[in-house]
Image (cartoon, rainbow, N blue to C red):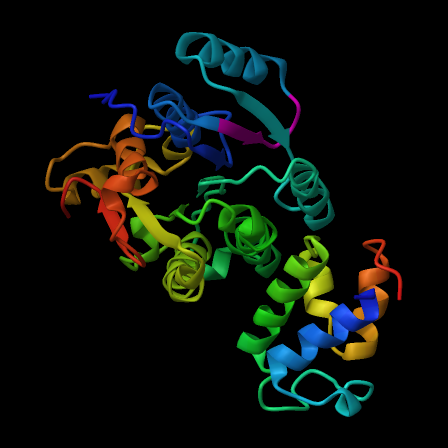
Amino acid sequence: MIYNSKLLVGKTAFVTGCNRGIGAKIIEIFAQNGANIFAHARKKNINFEKKLKALTLKYGVKINPIYFDLIDDIEIKSSLKSLYKDKVGIDILVNNAGIAHGGLIQMTPIDNIKNIFQVNVFSQLLIIQNLIKLLKINKNSSIINITSIAGIDAEAGSIAYGSSKAAFIFATKVLAKELIIDNIRVNAVAPGLTDTDMAELMELKAKSKMIQSSGMKRIASTTEIANAVLYLASDLSIFVNGQVIRVDGGI
Amino acid sequence: MTNLEKYNSVFKECFMIEEIQLEELIYQSVISWDSVGHMGLIAQLEEAFDIMLDTDDIIDFSSYKIGKEILKKYDIQF
């Protein structure tokens, strides 16, 4: 179910990884709720820009694409620097972009683990670090980090991905304490298995095990995850800080 | 007030120190210039000069002298 309560009118959001999956749904729901959006994708993409244009027309909000690759620190910094020209405050930052990986430790080259951490942890921290000043401007901002239950429940085969998400969860809690002085709340959403391209990459046995362990015996829709993000982005959660919300159907 | 006077004034107010201490002042050389004090200093400088320092410059801002060089990048002349 998609709620249309105009919860984000007058707010500006920056969302990473919007080309598909959870990120695409987040910007749809944010636009529907009246937010202006900087929508990030890895590479310039005509279809992506068409989708943004359609959302803009449908909901009467401003959506600007922004492109950078999360493995390239210099590209991240220079792209974010461009936002400082207008000194427009950002009210909501959703760190959604990430990459999945499955594999036992003995089958995972250390360079793969480093790469996963670069994208899922270090680049996310770099983005936060470089947007803090814009998040401070409006004196009531919210950062939402998209983590995973894989970073909470240790399972064989999740050494790289699970460890990276666990690190991101810990960072969320630390940042919640550091940034609240500037009225920036920091929370995380930890989705269970969700209906995205990422889930398609999972081995069938592991996927089936995850579904069976869910209280609701099914995978989440991207809307169900995005609605939790909407709650944390809006003033409905104004007194919520440093929390990790599991959206997994009850495990 | 000149830029130098403004710059000195921010340091003196933030760290409760005397003018004579400024030239040799480096990060953590006085108790008040710790990590929290550093962020306070940056906020005061940004307000005083109406600038926004880049993250890399905030990290590199490790002394009174280096700070002056960094501010020159933002067209603040001393």
Question: Of A141 and A23, which appears nearest the observer?
Answer: A141
Q: Pick whichever, B6 or A56, lies toward us.
A: B6
Tell me if I can see residue B11 in this picture.
yes
Question: Which quarter of the figure has residue A158?
Answer: bottom left
Say which quadrant the N terminus of chain B sits in.
bottom right
Q: Locate residue B20: give its quadrant.
A: bottom right
The image shows residue A32, relative to residue B43, as above or below, that is: above
Front one among A62 and B50: B50
Residue A193 coordinates in the image, percent (x, y): 29, 38
Q: As displayed, is residue A234 above or below residue A181?
A: above
Front-most of residues A238 and A106: A238
**Quarter containing the C terminus of chain B:** bottom right
What segment is highlighted magenta in the picture? A37-44
As for residue B4 lying within the magenta part, the answer is: no
Residue drawn at the location 34% of the way across and 40% of the way down: A233
* Image x and y of residue B59, in percent: 69, 68
Q: Is residue B65 above or below residue A8?
A: below
Instruction: Tell me the residue at 61%/43% (across/down).
Output: A70
Relative to A83, does residue A158 appear above or below in the rendering? below
User: Does residue A205 show up?
Assistant: no
Residue B73 percent coordinates (x, y): 84, 56
